[in-house]
């Protein structure tokens, strides 16, 4: 699986958009980009994933560059409850009956402030 | 809806004692099951995964073992705990199709003293 690079930490003011970058320059054509977040002392929570096209759901938007070498997770209106560690993961899609083995790095610690 | 239960939430064990952590999933059948460990200040490390009853794959050599005696039950065990086994243990499940999302339990904080 391709390696990802994320900033160690970021700050964001409450109510503003939080833009979390991720570099995955060695990504291959069949690898998906996943984002999870982990609030302190809890299990990680799935946010969003995509292959080529930009994606949006009720939690966030995922912007993937045309060459797929980087992506940005956007939280449109950050709140204090969005303070967490955010993980960017790339993973090849397995076939039916295979396991979704995801490798979590150290992620970006997002601190949302008043 | 699907839920995942993991217990206990915290555990303090002496070095050399046995370990058994249990995880059960409700509301789905034939899930893929996973055990992850997170050391303090570190990322999550995949320890074991299972695609069916009795089928266990180990990702890293270690002092731990896993078993899946029933479709929705996943157990993490050790015969003799080491200090280095301390950490935050997380159970997770996913569906069977490709690119399925992982759903995590609330975790067990294990301290080996």
Image (tube, rainbow, N blue to C red):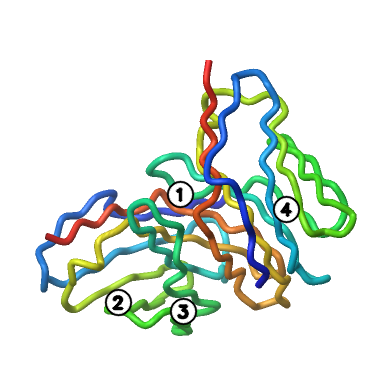
Q: Are marks 2 and 4 in contact (CB under 8 Å)?
A: no
Q: Are marks 3 and 1 on the same chain?
A: no
Residue occupied by mark 3: B59
Residue occupied by mark 1: A43
For marks 3 and 4, give the CA distance: 24 Å
Residue occupied by mark 2: B64
Q: Are marks 3 and 4 on the same chain?
A: no
- Expressed as whole percent of the image width and height from the top left, the position of residue A38 reads 50, 45
> Element at badge 1?
loop
A112 sits left or right of B85 in the view: right
Rendered-image quadrant of the C terminus of chain B: bottom left
> Element at badge 2?
loop
B19 sits left or right of A51 in the view: left
Q: Residue furthest top?
A: A114
- Expressed as whole percent of the image width and height from the top left, the position of residue A110 reads 54, 36
Mark 4 chain: A
Q: Residue at x 60, y 19 (%)?
A: A14
């Amino acid at each position: 699986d391709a390696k990802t690079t994320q900033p160690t930490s970021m700050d964001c003011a409450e109510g503003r958009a939080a833009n979390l970058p991720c570099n995955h320059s060695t990504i291959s054509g069949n690898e998906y980009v996943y984002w999870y977040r982990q609030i302190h002392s809890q299990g990680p929570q799935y946010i969003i994933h995509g292959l080529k096209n930009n994606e949006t759901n009720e939690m966030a938007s995922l912007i993937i560059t045309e060459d797929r070498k980087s992506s940005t997770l956007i939280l449109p209106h950050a709140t204090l409850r969005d303070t967490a560690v955010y993980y960017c993961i790339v993973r090849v899609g397995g076939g039916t009956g295979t396991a979704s083995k995801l490798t979590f790095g150290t992620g970006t610690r997002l601190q949302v402030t008043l | 809806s699907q839920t995942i239960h993991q217990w206990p939430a915290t555990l303090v064990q002496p070095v050399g004692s046995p370990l058994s952590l249990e995880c059960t999933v409700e509301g789905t059948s034939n899930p893929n099951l996973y055990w992850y460990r997170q050391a303090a200040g570190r990322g999550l490390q995949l320890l074991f995964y299972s695609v069916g009853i009795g089928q266990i794959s180990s990702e890293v050599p270690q002092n731990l073992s896993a078993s899946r005696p029933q479709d929705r039950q996943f157990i993490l065990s050790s015969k003799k705990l080491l200090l280095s086994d301390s950490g935050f243990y997380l159970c997770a499940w996913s569906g069977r199709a490709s690119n399925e999302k992982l759903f995590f339990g609330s975790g067990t904080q294990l301290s080996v003293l």
